[in-house]
Every structure is written in structure tokens, then in C-alpha cells.
Image: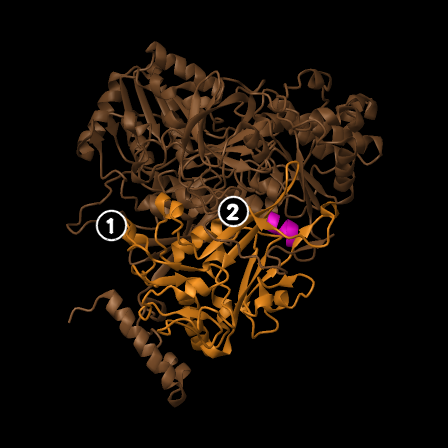
Amino acid sequence: MTMSDYKWGMAVDIDACSGCQACVIACAAENNLPINLERDFTERRAIAWIRIERYWEGEYPNIKAHFLPVLCQHCGNAPCEPVCPVYATYHNPAGLNVQVYNRCVGTRYCANNCPYHARFFNYRRPTWPETFHNYLNPDVTVRERGIMEKCTFCIQRINAAVRIAKRTGTSAPDHFMTACEQACPTDALTFGNLNDPNSRVSQLFADESRAYTLQGAIGTEPNVRYLKGVATAKAGSDEMTAAAH
Amino acid sequence: MDLTRRDFLRVAGATSVAGVLFAGCAIPERELIKQSPRDLPEDLAEGLEDMYATSCASCREGCGILVRVAEGRAKKIEGNPDHPLNRGGILAGCLAGVQSLYHPDRFSGPMENGRSITWAGGLARLDALLNGADASRTLLITRANRGHLGAVTHEFAQGSGIRHLQLEPLENAAIRQAAKDVFDQDRLPFFDIANAGSVLSIGADFLESWLAPIHYSKAYGHFRRGEGKSRGTHVHASSRFSMTAANADTWLPVAPGREGILALSIAYVLAHEGLADEATVNAMTGGLGEGALAAYRPDAIADQLGATPGVLTGQMITDVAHNLASHGPTVVLVGSSAAAQPNGLFNAKAGMILNGVLGSVGRRGGVQFNSDTSLPELQGLPAPTTYAEWRGVRNQLERGDIDLVLVDDANPVHALASLKFGQALSRARNVVSFSSEPNETTAMADLILPDQHYLESWGTNAPDPGPGYEVLTVQQPVVAPLLDSSRHPVHDSRAMGDILISLMQSRVISRRTRGDNMEQVVLNALADLHALHPGRGSVQGSTLAAFTTGVLQRGGWWNIAGRGVTVWERPAFDFTPALADMPERIAEHADRYHLIPFASATVGDGSGGHLPWVQSAPDPVTSMVWHSWVEVNSREAARLGLRDGDLVALESDSGSVEVPVYLHPGIPPNVVAVPFGRGRAFSGRYGDNPDGNVNTVLGDIEVEGTGSQAWAATAVTIRPLGRRMRMARMEGGFTGQQLEGTHIIQLEYT
């Protein structure tokens, strides 16, 4: 099977996500994300390809918090793509929204147009102490200052798995997981091939009672779907509107 | 031609206009595919890489990890999907192991009084110090270790007559004592969350810090969404709204110190309505039955149990009891702040007894007892040192009764700040540290002999608690120590276990472990396992070589078939003093607050505070990073005139801590919460604010009957400092993305 035989997608079960941040650090470790120092947070320039948003519902004593992992939704109709003046972001045959680092000139139009805040700009040249270079992933480009970056669905793992699958006559999803999915201790993330109707991710996407897309109403056609959380009867309303605190 | 970035943008803009004009003459998609970035690393397959199975030692849980090694460098740590504790799961602190391995502030070699020395000189100095000091005036401080390094350390201390102290920053002495008193078990029991129908956690923040959070998180995923089982229901009762509370279906805000009474109140409902295990109720009440529990009738005491009056009602407690009974099997977990009250042992025992009342002891989806390790050298290792014992040691140091202190992989100056341990340690004549990176304790050491990293050395871990059967996680070196361009070690370190073994050999100290170094000790232990369990367990090599290779490939050995039968001799329980001993509940809107410190899922006890991934991983509930904070109820803060980021001093009779205010809508108004592990003053370039160590404000209060610290029983006042700081956190870094009619969080109702 070649790359175009696959369509990659991810299901995020917000009922299972405990909010532990393991995926956040696993992603940083796998994809050579710059170290987010204190000033990166205070200046709102921290880079996190996946982040856990926390939403409050109510207040003491009737309080609930919901965790929502947010990453690039790899939209089928991606608002970031048409605004790039140099075609640095485009849709590849496997449904990925891909960022070509050596084309990016840093206009940041794509980040402005992303409704999920999933794109991050390197305002500074990422630097690591010399000894930390030893743990950088040799399979992943280190992005320069002035470059836009975002979740790739661990494309280096996808490429390696597709190569193995081709060589062995097997299916690529048998050979890998994304770094966030692999780390998740509660198995809240499920990645896989949406072209295979029997894959677990396809089955979860098809769960009409639970699957929904983030802001799907604006027509972005995301390849990430969320599985509804569960509220006990005590909550008392049909559907809640959560607001970021 | 000099082309500036701005010029380039202008040129690029013009080119894109041209591109639009000629769009009809080309096939952009095809062109784009042809020019895909095929020379980037993501598209290349180069080099060989290996995955090594070993044990994570970033905390004491003893999980299995896989380390990806390429070109002799450890690249990434992943959970070992084969390991029975974590089954591939991992937390932020474990992932940062590669940062501690390659930390730029890691000591480059042995040092004496800040000057580099040779290993020969360092070891000779250590030998001289040990020979010159009276053993009774010498201390050996390590962190709690249940593996072969723990055994070697214990043998060395015992054989030399030196007192061995094991630091456990988040003490579990009350839980261990309760397991002993209620279940007659020396090892912590296995809580089978994965197969439970409902979970009641009382204080225990089991998804973030309590006992074995990775193991419990993995089990929780199955508990919630397991194949072939219905979704489990979770009730959490605690004084602070934690990450575990956020995950629960129902949160019961209970007053600090009244958690055990809540457990007995639930037990009363079960006994009264015939939903309880009769044998347990009869045994624990001396045959009196529900009558012995009448004082705990929910209607009678519910109002006293809530964090503030009125938040818990009798009906709520009754509903919870019904829920637990109807969604069995139920497992009850009790600990964290509930076990860190003056009556923490009562709370812990009451929670464990509730397991019995629910008929969950010995049941799948309930509580099962763990078997001891079969290796004799790991049996009977001493329990971690209690707070009361540390206080005695502090007094000894202050009196000048201690001349020499050896410290490895522990930071008592930070963890025991409430005892002002640092001041006392300065009275010791010599402090020798085996730590490999700077911290508050190594800052006081005159001789530093840096230990090897756990990814460079041998060891084992017999996890406590285990998963219900015997497990030995094996730690092996996955990379050779790093060399510089002239082939000298960048971090010239030696395994402390090897040093202790050679000291024992030169002093002719008898041992149970066998081998001239830690590698031989571990391999000999595997030989013993092979002989003790022929043809049993996860690896069954016909030869010792095959067995050893198999164990190293899988990251350890475990024996699922060796799961023991849980036999419980139900003890009688004295209920009378509980209500009389109920700790005071601080009134709402008084000028004092219950201080509930907590261990965040990211920073934990602070031992990884020098690692940037640990510091920058947002706290799950507040999203705070890089520095400490105090959680204050939003409405209470408004009443006090406090805003987000205002700096305040929390003051107790013991000390004060300076922290910024985080407005928290879920914390009770008479409670404030500060994370442990912050305020690392000497943790190299990635440390945080030195004023934020909550240990400095904790009262000198013990959990009765255990000697451990009642760290959640301090009352504090809030004094505004008239200054503010910009809070470092993820929250607010992104503008809201919710549009009218599109719900970000969607829920289904059950």
C-alpha cells in the first residue's frame, strides 16, 4: 500500500482523558519541540502541538472540570491552507495537513486563520544546551526561527510504518502509534486509518451517539473527532456550554 | 545581493500574485507533490536504532520502560506495553528521564569543596572519612528503594553499624500501618480498579500522585471504557478539587480530617439496608451490627462532614452508598491528604474497612493482597523513615551528635524544610553526596561522588504495591556514559552500589547479595529467580542464559499464575473515639485557612524540578508552570480583595511561604492549596522561585499512631504583599474558540 491508500485520523475520548499531560511531553520529546521557558508562557509564545484545555463548569460546591486535548485537526477543508502565499501548508494524499518548513516564510497568515489555535510560530531560534542535543530525535527536523510549526500526526512514524508495510505486505497502522497515543495512560487517544472501515478509529468515528467534531459547523471537516464526555444525571441539562475560565 | 526577510516577503507576495494569474496554466497540486520535502529527516530512513527494556527510576513506582537508542544516545523513553504495572502507560516525569541523563548541570566528576578531584582521590577521601568517623555518629540517607540497590545499601549500613534513613517525601506510613492493622499485610494491597464497577476515592489522588499513579491511570482507562464492560462510576471525596476530583462523576467536598467518618457513614447505610457483607460488619462491630454504627447515621452527621456547612447532606451520602452497592464490585482507595491528618490512620483504616463492608476484599475488582518477593535479599527491607524519626535525627544533628552524613538520590534539605533540616545538616562535620545533579542538599556537601544515571546502571525494583502478584522490574544500562571529543567521560560518574560493594569487601562485611558489582548482583538474582521458579512466570528459559536474556528483553520477570488467595481475618474496630477526635473545621470567612498541599501530576514531590519538561508541563487543573502558586476560592479572593497573580505570604506558626494567588472556582472557601515540589532553590539553570517551597510553612504535626507527618493539617493566614506577578501558565494563552451554537465540550447524559 502506498501513502495515498491511507487516510489518517484520530479519535479523542474526552470521557477517558484524565488531563495528566503525558501526551504533551511525549509530543515534545518525539518532535523536538523547543523548551518552553517561563517567559514563553508569560509572553504567550509557548509551543505545544498538543495541549490539554481545561474548562470549568459551575463553581464550588457544584463544580466540574472537563479536559480537552487540542491538536491540529488535520482539516479536510483547512482554513490554513488557502491563505499561505508560498504553499508551505498543503493537503497530502493521506489526508494530512502538512507543513513544509523550507517553504515557510513566516507570514503567520495560517495561524491567524486556524480556528483551533493549533499552529505555532517560532519567534525565537530554538536552542538547547549542548548535552541536550543528544536526545533530539534524528528523524525530525528542528525548526528555525521564523518558521510555523504544528502537529504532523508524527509523520516520521507514518513514513517509517508505510515503508515497513510496503516491504512486508502488511498494513502500516500495525507498525506504529503516534507519540501522544502511545504515552496516554488512559487510552483516550486512538489513531488509525480511516480508509479501513474495520479499524478502531473508523468505528469510533462512526459512533453517532458520541462522536463530534470541534467546531464542525464552520465546515473545516476535521480528521480528528471527539467522543463526548459523560455527565451524570445530577448535571441536569441536555447539553452544557462550557466557557474557558 | 543582500536579501532581507522583508524583501523576500515582498518578492514572495508578488510571486504569489503571478501564481494566481497563471493558475489556469498549471496543476498546482501535482507541482506541490513533486516538490515535497523529500530531503527532510521525516522522509529518510537512516541508521539503526534499538529499543531496550529497563526500569524507570524517576519515582519509586517501578514501571517498565522502553528506551529508544540511536547512535549510542538515548532518544526517547516510552512505556513498556508488556509490563504488568504500567502496560505502556507513562507520565510526564518519566519521559523527562533523557533530560536528567543529558542534563547540562549534571556533575562532570567527583568534587571536593567545589574543586574537581580524581575518582581515586575521591574514594580515598570517602574511605578516610568512614574510618575517621564513629559509625554511631554517621548517617546514610537514601530514597526509599525496594530493589537490589536498597538491599546493598541496607547491608552496607547494617554491616558498618551506620544508621540507614530512607526518605519518602510523600509519606505512606499511615497507609502501610492501616494495611497492617486492617489486612495484616506488610505490603500494600492491590486495588483492582480496572475490573471494578465503581471506585470511591477518599482523599487519594490516585490519578496523579498516590502510590502508583501510572498503574492506576492505565487501570482507570479500562475501568471507564474497557472492552466488554460497562462504564465504571467514580466518586471522589476530598478537601481540595484535584485532577482526580475533576475526573470523578461526583465530588464530595469533605472537611479535612473527617474523611474516615464519611466512610463509616457510608458503611452505616450499607449495614442498615442489608447491603453490607454481614461477616465483616459483625466482626468489626463485635457482633453488634449496624447498631454500633448508629452514631454515623448520615442524617445525624452529614452537616459536620462537608468542607463547609450544608454542602453534604444525608441524602447525598445515602445516594453514594446505594451507587457503590449497585455498581459492584467496588474498590475504596484512601490516602493523600486524608491520611495526612492527625487522625489520618483512623481515616485510612475506615476506608480500608469499607472495602470489607462492601464485600470487596479478595474479589476481582476489589482489594487483593500482594505476595512478597521470593528473593530472600529483598525480603524484610526496612520501611521508609518516618517524620518522627527524621525529627529525632534533626535533633541529633543540632546537638552535634552526628559527624558524617552520606546522601544518595535524596534531597532532605528541600523535602524536610518544615524540620529546618538544612540548618541542622550544617552542624555535621562532613557531608558526602552521591547525587549526580545539584540540589539543596548537594549544595551543602563537601565531597561529591556522582552516581550513575539509571539509564547507565544496573538495578532492580520489586514494586510495592505490586499488581497482585510477584514482579521484579530489571534495570539495565541502555547507553554507555557520554564521551567528549577526546574520549573523556562528559559525566564521570560511578554507581553508588558498586562503591558500597567495594567498601563492604574491603571491610569484610557479610552480605546476602552476591557479586563484585551491581551487574553481578542483578545477574545472580536472576539466576536465583530461575532456580526458584523453574518453568514459571513471564520468562521460562530452559537455560539460565536464555532466561537472563529473556528477562532483560522484557524488562523484568513476573508471575501472573502466582497470584495468591486473599485470606482476611477481619479485625474488630473501635468506633467510639472517632467522633470525639474529629479535627476542628475552620469556619468560612474566618481569617485562617486549612492548607492542603498536594503533589501535582507533573512536578510531584519536586525531585524532577531541575528538568525543563517537568517544570514546563502544565499542572492539569490550573495549567500553571515554572513556579508555585496558592489556590484560593474565587469568591473568597474577591472578598479579600485579591486578584489573580497577587503575591501573598501564607503564614503559620512554623513559617511562611510567598506565592502568587490563583483564583480557583472549585476549592472550598476555607481551604487554600499549594503544590509540593516547587521552590527548588539549587536545581541548576532550570530551577524555579526559591520562595515557593510549601514545606517551609507546614506545622510540626504527626499522624497519631504512625509517626508520619500530618502535612495537610496546618492552618495559615493570608497576608497580601502588595505586589503582583505575571503568572506563567497555559490557561489564557489562547483566545476562546467557542462560537455560538458550537459546543466545545459535549456530554452525553446517563
Identify the secondary structure beneath mark 1.
Answer: helix
Most foreground residue, B557 or B17: B17
Q: Is residue B24 left or right of residue B447?
A: right
Q: Quadrant of the N terminus of chain B?
A: bottom left
Q: Residue at x 32, y 31 (%)?
A: B500
Marker disc for residue B269: none
The chain that hosts pointer 1 is A
Q: Earlier in the sequence, mark 2 or mark 1?
A: 2
Residue B584, x across and y down, in percent: 63, 18
The chain letter of the brown chain reads B
* Element carrying mark 2: loop
Residue B373 in sight in this render = no
Drawn side of residue B115 relative to residue B605, left or right: left
Q: Tell me, by letter, which chain the rendering colours orange.
A: A
A27, above or below B414, in the image: below
**Residue B653 on the magenta segment:** no
CB-based contact (under 8 Å), mark 2 and mark 1: no
Q: Residue furthest right?
A: B273
Q: Which residue is situated farthest in the top direction here? A: B399
Q: Which residues are magenta?
A: B220-225
Total labels drawn: 2
Residue B676 in view, yes or no? yes
Residue type at mark 2: give it: Cys
Dominant secondary-structure state across the stretch colored magenta: helix
Residue B452, quarter of picture? top left
Q: Label 1: which residue? A: A130
Q: Is residue B262 above or below residue A73?
A: above
Q: Is-magenta flag for residue B222?
A: yes
In percent of width and height, residue B365 lies at 68, 44
Q: Position of residue B370 (x, y in %)?
A: 59, 37
Q: Badge 2: how crowded within 10 Å, few (<14), some, or many (20+)?
A: many
**Mark 2 lies on residue:** A20
